[in-house]
Image: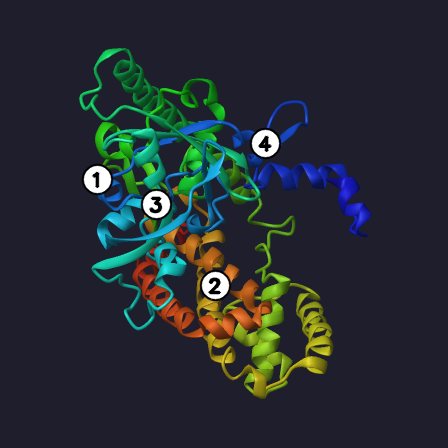
């Protein structure tokens, strides 16, 4: 890693390389400073998909999220390519009830499944913004034609397809048929082996909850479980995760995690803090105060500060002090020389922005940026209030705390994306609608978190008689 970055002129030492790899979602940490990419981990490993009755009748297989975590989750499922006996299965489009379609994309998260469905080329004419992101009763989905498997290899209803990725980068997957259609009740050796597979999967999931927590996504949860248990889970008589969730899961379910979903103990809330991240929060709590007992400075990422400066020009103003008041909480007390340093940062960014900014070309994206920054300002200020609390972060309402961190992350990613103007112009209406929903979410959690902050402030004072 260090050599690669040095080759492109970026200073990057071994320690920084290790820190990057430890937090990279595309890499698994091994032992002795060794790492393995997801491509290296999952290429060639086996998993299975059981086509639904609706798919069999339309002679189509919809990959959806059913290949996760064995494929690149950032590839649209409609772009995956399937092969049987070395021959490519042709693409095909089918029509499905939206509820069934969401089930096929459920491992992206129920909250994201409609967006993945809408992104399918077969739904190019579907205007999700005008529908408030609600799917119609029927949707078109792109999959692969399984007619050759039915006509030449006697694929029956209820049979499953054993799959393995042959090329991670291109999304190529080989399939063979496992004739299992008559074994509805999981009898015999094969049935017993598959039931044992579901038991082992549940045990592995429960163990991961204790050790790794909810992770960053459903995909990350599954990737960790399958990577760490390949010998027992990636086998020819495997079941499918989809079947496990719908038929065999006893102690595991899809549970709300703020505005997202995660695999978790069935019927239980997913907490923000647990054994998996308690050390991180303890570290944060110890570092809240600097050596001179002043609060840790309020931080604004450099790329977000750049967007504040662009927004200043969109509002036809060049007033650095006014911009600072907009960015920082009203009661924020600047440390020694901090204000002059921030003003220097703003001026340095503005020297670069002013030369290339075009107000007329910014009329489509400008209002989106302004809305995103206004909400980010409020969210960041509340993050700061929580972070400055003297009590343990475990004392805050957990779901509200989760949503706050998710809102911060989503807004940060949106503001980072403002470098891709062409994409933003195309998606401006959708982003404004999304920001409106995020604002509603923020107002829902704001009260409970502010009350928790105020309660902890009061607890700092003791009455002395």
Secondary structure beneath disc 1? helix
Q: Marks 4 and 1, Cα distance to the nearest angstrom?
A: 34 Å
Mark 3 or 2 closer to N-term? Answer: 3
- From where the camera sits, is residue 143 visible? yes
Q: Which residue bears the numbered disc 2?
A: 381
Task: State the image quarter where residue 147 is shown.
Answer: top left
CB under 8 Å between discs 2 and 4: no
Foreground mark, 3 or 4? 3
Q: CA distance from mark 3 to mark 2?
A: 44 Å
Q: Which residue is mark 1?
A: 53
Choose mark 2 or mark 4, whichever is in front: 4
Quadrant including the N terminus: top right
Residue at mark 1 to residue at mark 2: CA–CA distance = 51 Å
Q: In the current view of this chain or complex, which residue is farthest to the front?
A: 152
- The structure residue drawn at horizontal position 58% and vertical position 84%, both measured from the top left corner, is 361
Q: Secondary structure at mark 2?
A: helix
298 with respect to 222 (left or right): right
Neighbours of disc 3 within 10 Å: few (<14), some (14-19), many (20+): many
Q: Earlier in the sequence, mark 1 or mark 3?
A: 1
Question: Residue 226, percent across and down?
Answer: 45, 28
- Label 3 or label 2, whichever lies nearer to me, is 3
Residue depicted at x 36% and y 51%: 92
- SS class, disc 3: loop
- Mark 4: give few (<14), some (14-19) or many (20+) Cα within 10 Å: few
């Amino acid at each position: 890693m260090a050599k690669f970055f040095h080759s492109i002129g970026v200073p990057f030492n071994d320690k920084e390389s290790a820190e990057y790899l430890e937090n990279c979602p595309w890499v698994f940490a091994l032992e002795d400073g060794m790492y393995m990419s997801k491509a290296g981990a999952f290429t060639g490993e086996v998993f299975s998909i059981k086509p639904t009755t609706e798919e069999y009748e339309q002679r189509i297989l919809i990959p959806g999220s059913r290949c996760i975590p064995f494929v690149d989750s950032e590839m649209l499922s409609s772009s995956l390519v399937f092969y049987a006996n070395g021959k490519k299965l042709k693409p095909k489009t089918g029509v499905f009830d939206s509820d069934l379609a969401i089930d096929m994309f459920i491992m992206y998260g129920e909250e994201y499944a409609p967006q993945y469905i809408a992104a399918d080329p077969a739904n190019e004419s579907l205007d999700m913004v005008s529908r408030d992101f609600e799917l119609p009763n029927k949707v078109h989905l792109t999959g692969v034609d399984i007619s050759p498997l039915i006509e030449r290899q006697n694929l029956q209803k209820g049979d499953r397809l054993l799959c393995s990725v042959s090329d991670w980068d291109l999304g190529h997957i080989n399939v063979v048929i496992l004739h299992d259609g008559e074994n509805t009740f999981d009898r015999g050796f094969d049935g017993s082996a598959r039931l044992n597979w579901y038991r082992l999967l549940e045990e592995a999931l429960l163990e991961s909850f204790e050790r790794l927590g909810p992770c960053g996504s459903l995909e990350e949860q599954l990737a960790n479980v399958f990577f760490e248990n390949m010998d027992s889970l990636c086998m020819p008589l495997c079941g499918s995760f989809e079947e496990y969730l719908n038929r065999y899961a006893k102690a595991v379910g899809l549970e709300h995690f703020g505005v997202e979903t995660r695999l978790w103990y069935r019927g239980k809330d997913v907490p923000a803090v647990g054994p998996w991240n308690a050390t991180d929060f303890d570290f944060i709590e110890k570092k809240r105060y600097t050596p001179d007992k002043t609060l840790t400075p309020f931080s604004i990422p450099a790329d977000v500060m750049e967007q504040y400066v662009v927004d200043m020009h969109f509002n036809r103003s060049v007033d650095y002090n006014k911009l600072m008041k907009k960015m920082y909480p009203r009661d924020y007390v600047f440390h020694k020389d901090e204000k002059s340093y921030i003003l220097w940062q703003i001026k340095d960014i503005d020297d670069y922005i002013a030369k290339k900014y075009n107000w007329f070309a910014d009329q489509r994206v400008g209002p989106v940026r302004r809305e995103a920054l206004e909400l980010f300002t409020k969210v960041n200020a509340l993050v700061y209030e929580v972070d400055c609390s003297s009590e343990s972060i475990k004392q805050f309402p957990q779901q509200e705390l989760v949503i706050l961190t998710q809102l911060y992350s989503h807004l940060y990613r949106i503001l980072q994306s403002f470098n891709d103007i062409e994409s933003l112009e195309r998606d401006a209406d959708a982003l404004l609608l999304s920001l409106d929903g995020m604002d509603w979410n923020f107002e829902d959690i704001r009260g409970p978190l502010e009350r928790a902050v105020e309660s902890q402030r009061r607890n700092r004072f003791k009455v002395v008689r």
